[in-house]
Image (cartoon, rainbow, N blue to C red):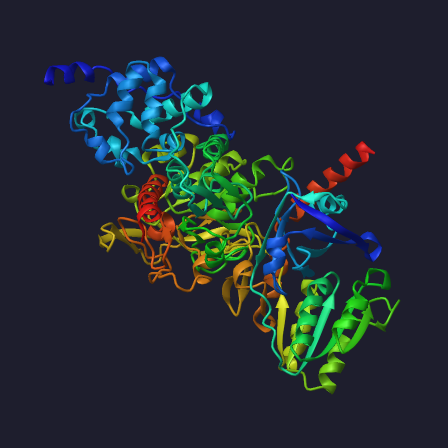
Amino acid sequence: MAEIAEKKEKIPRQSMPEQAAKVRAKNFEEVPTGYSPEVAMIEAKRCLQCKKPACVEGCPVGVDIPGFIGHIRDGKFEQAISLIWKRNGLPAVCGRVCPQELQCEGLCIVGKKGEPVAIGNLERFAADYARKSGECELPVKAEPTGKKVAVVGSGPSGLTVAGDLALKGHEVTIFEAFHKPGGVLVYGIPEFRLPKEIVFAEVEGLETLGVKLECNAVVGRTVSLDELFEQGYDAIFLGVGAGLPTFLNIPGENLIGILSANEYLTRSNLMKAYLFPKYDTPVVRGKNVITLGAGNVAMDSARTALRLGAQSSRIVYRRSRQEVPARGAEVHHAEEEGVEFHFLTSPVEFKGNEKGRVTGMVGLKMELGEPDSSGRRRPIAIKGSEFELECDLAIIAVGAGANPLLTQSTKDLELNKWGYIVADEATGKTSKKGVWAGGDIVTGSATVILAMGAGRQAADSIHDYLTRGW
Amino acid sequence: MFKIVGREEMANGTVVLNEIEAPLIAKKAKPGQFVILKATETGERIPLTMADTDPEKGTITIIYMVVGKSTALFKSLKVEDGYLDVIGPLGKPTHLENVGNVVCVGGGTGVAVLHPITRGLKQAGNNVISIIGARNKGLLILEEQMKAASHKLYVCTDDGSYGHHGFVTDVLKDVLTKNDIKLVVGIGPVPMMKFVCKMTKDFNVKTLVSLNPIMIDGTGMCGGCRVSIGGKTQFACVDGPEFDGHQVDFDELMLRLQAYTEDEKASHDEYCNLKKEKA
């Protein structure tokens, strides 16, 4: 076994071709261009096909990773995707945006000595192959049960629930507040990281399975949960996302040119402001851009700013590089493209001109103290270290809270002190009969795959309820 | 698609009324609430407070002033055409209760938003005095409807071409001096609302205003519509659109409404040129 392992290690991890940093920083096309079948098969050979695969334990939806990689190795790409689909309805998305380094790839045995198998890249390859070739069999649908399920929100958790329950024979309708489906996959994640065509293809796949889609439906306003029950829905899943922007509450924050990342990215991604004036929605195009925060959303914002013509795009983060919450690949890509990082800097105030437009940000230098409740070293302000950074656009990407639109209008839904929905960890059941919840509206801002994991659990529990009772 | 079933041009074609099929919204909407409309695939999401609803017919009515590309595009839509997307009802409804003597002050297309609120206040048992104004007689809208919705209506024009020669605030001052007014509702251009509030503050009369800042989603998700209310940031889309006028930072609102002026102009110019070329 050891001998085989050594032999296999000789194949280096296959990198995915990418657009050159200087070129891609000026366009919205996808950055990595994907494996060719040959390269995918070489990469697949690196997998040890462990009997007890640790990688699978790291996957929130339990994809049979060695299984699908084995099929790719053998050139059986249709079988690879069929196997993935059994556990994951959005592989083209997950292959691109999952934090693999913290999940499957983080636990890969090959990674103990060298670089782990590129599981994410292989998943993406299989999904893209299936989408492009159109040769793969759709999963088989169970006989209709006559039960109706309403899914509120068409982000990762909602799409997962809809797909799972449609396959089990239930009649599913998705209600989406925006005019297009996909939730954060469409309004939040930029085109260069996740082409929208991929998300729409996944949604179309669901529609082929019989899932109905109602856009422009703001549940809580256009229709209430109780009205949905009156209309004959037997169960409701709430996957409405976090969706409340956090602001800094510092002076000058309402100047023109200071936007929440939600607004900035929604304008650019959903409304396609990057194609203005072909599309009618504009977005502030800053020359000197500051993004506050260092998560994936902050990286997306800072990189979008470059593509919209910024001469400088700076990330300002109050902790150090070690605490950066974004995926390693995103930080790496941002740095390659020319995003500058200002660590241990906390925003104090924004300055503006007589037209009410932002002209700069006053920052304060920080140093790291003892660990705080999150286990990360707490940043402490260095007295008298204020300095000013020039900017004509500042993007606030310091996280999101629970949007109260739906929860406030639903009185019998138990919330925690932060306004998130209280739901059973194993099943997603809420305090309201017949209502489940999952994703960011339960956990607070997290990842696509965790939301999908919650959707999977909720779908199992809903199926149980519809066939056996509450 | 949300079909247009009625259309009317007002104020010399600068203002347009659309009655739109939207049964779910019509059933739910209350005075003071708004919808977001998007005409085409490439269009903007435009928030507009509803001027009327007909739950039985399943329609809502919007009245808008043509100011830029998006509203010019709206204006190009005929009866039987439709909007690609209409979302709502959004925002909090007006709190309609009987407080006694109320004054409803409207300017420009603000009168369209004011009308259902005026009617609601009258139905709630209030004695309603209304004051509406426009720059000149030709730009005045909904005079008859406002007359019917109020016990007494005053009309003002800036140039004196009709009714009282002067601003709505001139008449308001007189009304506030001579009557025991419990509530003022002021809806119109931001400067008008600002001056109405300045005056009612002197008289210490509670005043509601309806704000229409730049907005994207209308569900509290983007924060683009944030306004300062009593020094605190609130979102007009979910916390409003109506606020206590004495707490609103109108100067900040006026600046924020200018955020995309240059882009809007460029976009409108291009649209007009394209239209000319086509013609």
Measured as percent of width and height from the top left, residue A44 is found at: 28, 18
B213 over B154 or under it: above or below: above
Comparing A70 with B272, the one in front is A70
Please name whichever residue, A47 or A350, is drawn nearer the observer in this view of the structure: A47
The part of the image, by quadrant, that contains residue A324 is: top left
* Vertical placement of residue B139 versus A217, above or below: below
Residue B249, compared with residue B89, is above or below; it is below
Which sits in the foreground, B132 or A407? A407
The percent position of residue B244, horizontal first and vertical second, equals 58, 71
Residue A174 x, y percent position in the rendering: 47, 44
Q: Is residue A268 left or right of residue A407?
A: right
Quarter where residue B274 is shown:
top right
Residue A217 shows in this picture: yes
**Residue drawn 35% across the image and 48% down it:** A438
Residue A298 visible in the displayed image: no
Left or right of B2? Residue B269 is right
Residue A228 or residue B205, whichever sits in front: A228
Quadrant holding the N terminus of chain A: top left
Tell me where residue A129 appears, x and y as whole percent. Answer: 41, 20
